[in-house]
Amino acid sequence: MSKKIASARISQESSKLLQELNQSLPFDKLLYKEDIKGSLAHSKMLQKQGIISKKEYKDIKNALKQVRDEIKTGQLKLDGDDEDIHMAVESRVTQIAGDSGKRLHTARSRNDQVAVDFRLFVQKNTLDIASLLLRNIDTFIFIASKHTNTLLPGMTHLQHAQPINFGYHLMAYVSMFKRDYERFMDAYDRNNYSPLGCAALAGTPHNIDREMTSKELGFKKPTLNCLDSVSDRDFALDMLYNISTMMMHISRLSEELILWSSSEFGFITLSDAHATGSSIMPQKKNPDIPELLRGKTGRVNGNLISLLTVMKSLPLAYNKDMQEDKEGVFDSIKTATLSLKVLEEMMAQMSVNVDNMEKACMIGHLSATDLADYLVKEVGIAFRDAYYITGDCVNLAESKGVDISELTLQDLQSIDNRIKKNILELLDNRASMNARDSQGGTATKRTKEQIKIMKKWLNKKVSFIEYQK
Ligand code: ARG
């Protein structure tokens, strides 16, 4: 039997098994800074409102700061019987501050306390992740700007389709990461409200000032409805969903990097720092990092589904089920943060095998669509007819073992004599890439335009990165 938790009502000792099932301290100790920050704001407000005396506030404040130092330096080990971080901090504060410490929990409950702590933690990490996304965007733009003229086979169904440039491909990921960034920042704004002072579920009869604690903690305003505020874990779900979507993007890129680094493609070479060997095959260099990033996406998706499932049938307000909200969020945040750091480093150090990319563009008759477009635009043939004429040219190239861009004028005219000499320059892959110069297209000129727009957008965010450093 072990030490009773917060219980005026329960006289019998708790079962050891209850203690083990119930205790969240082993994982929620991660929230100690937020817990102390919340208590500092709360006690300051209690004093200002005349609910506790100046001396009591001073004792509590000093004790809270001492506890923070003790935890930071490892002097206070959070490995005791306390049920959770809130009880652990409060009991140490009371040891230090004596009777004054017993007044700290006036006009609040652990229900609003945990809602504040967890939300502060999620909000802080939202900014950190958003800032790491900006760093990745910066790195991707830098690499893209060096490869706006590097040909790459653009694919659909993983089959060669049309020539694009490598910079353009990377800029597609920049667009995804920009949306991810915006999604995190939207969530930050949406959830930037303080639940402190909501108490157990219905507010409190004490004359508290929620505007003050909200401001102290850096929130925009106090939340509107206390019942909702202690029941709400949407901020955690937003975080999990945003991480899942971002990791899904990283996973798609990882899949491409894995393919591209294979001998079949040979488009990129990961630096030795980001690949591992095999324990048995001495010649091997494995792309473990992108494989792990791809794999970790499964894990963060699990965390999202897990919390959605925990929350789905809970009546208002707090239910102990909600203690299951933290570990998945901690895990997803840790995973996302590390993944973004690794991704940026790996991309910055990988080498791009330009020759192999360009050579691969000679497989698959990438400029076939250009021939069909030529027949429509220059000869006035209906697209469906042009499509079949082009098909015949592709078959001819196949039978000769060459790419469509390598057929001679005579070859092409043997299929359709309306084809004129000016087709030849159009079938060149680089010309084909540059011909796609509609807005948002792959033409070098258009890719550079996209880079310019993204750089401008990023520059406006630089002060944000600096602030995060
Ligand atoms: N450890 C709890 C949690 O993480 C704190 C809230 C406890 N509230 C309660 N009424 N038991 O959810």
Image: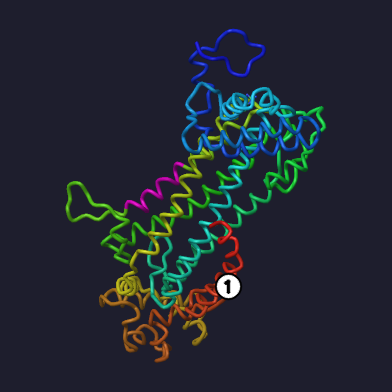
Q: Residue furthest front?
A: 55
Q: Is residue 106 above or below residue 243?
A: above
Coloration of the structure image: rainbow
Q: Is residue 191 left or right of residue 81?
A: right
Characterize the local packing of mark 1: few (<14), some (14-19) or many (20 or more) Cα atoms within 10 angstroms.
Answer: few
Q: Hey, which quadrant is residue 101 in on the image? A: top right
At horizontal 28% and vertical 77% (from top left) the residue drawn is 402
Q: Residue furthest bottom?
A: 421
Residue that carries the numbered disc 1 in the rendered image = 453
The range drawn in magenta is: 288-299
Q: Hey, which quadrant is residue 432 in on the image? A: bottom left
Between 305 and 278, the residue placed more toward the observer is 278
Q: Residue furthest top?
A: 12
Percent x, y of residue 442? 48, 74
Percent x, y of residue 405? 35, 81
Percent x, y of residue 363? 32, 71
Residue 298 lies in the magenta-colored region: yes
At horizontal 63% and vertical 41% (from top left) the residue drawn is 119
Q: Is residue 175 above or below residue 87?
A: below
Q: Is residue 201 left or right of residue 294?
A: right
Q: Secondary structure at mark 1?
A: helix
Q: Amino acid at mark 1?
A: Ile
Between 266 and 395, the residue placed more toward the observer is 266
At horizontal 67% and vertical 37% (from top left) the residue drawn is 40
Q: Is residue 430 above or below residue 5?
A: below
Which SS does the magenta portion mostly show? helix
Rendering quadrant holding ligand 1 = top right
Percent x, y of residue 150? 39, 75
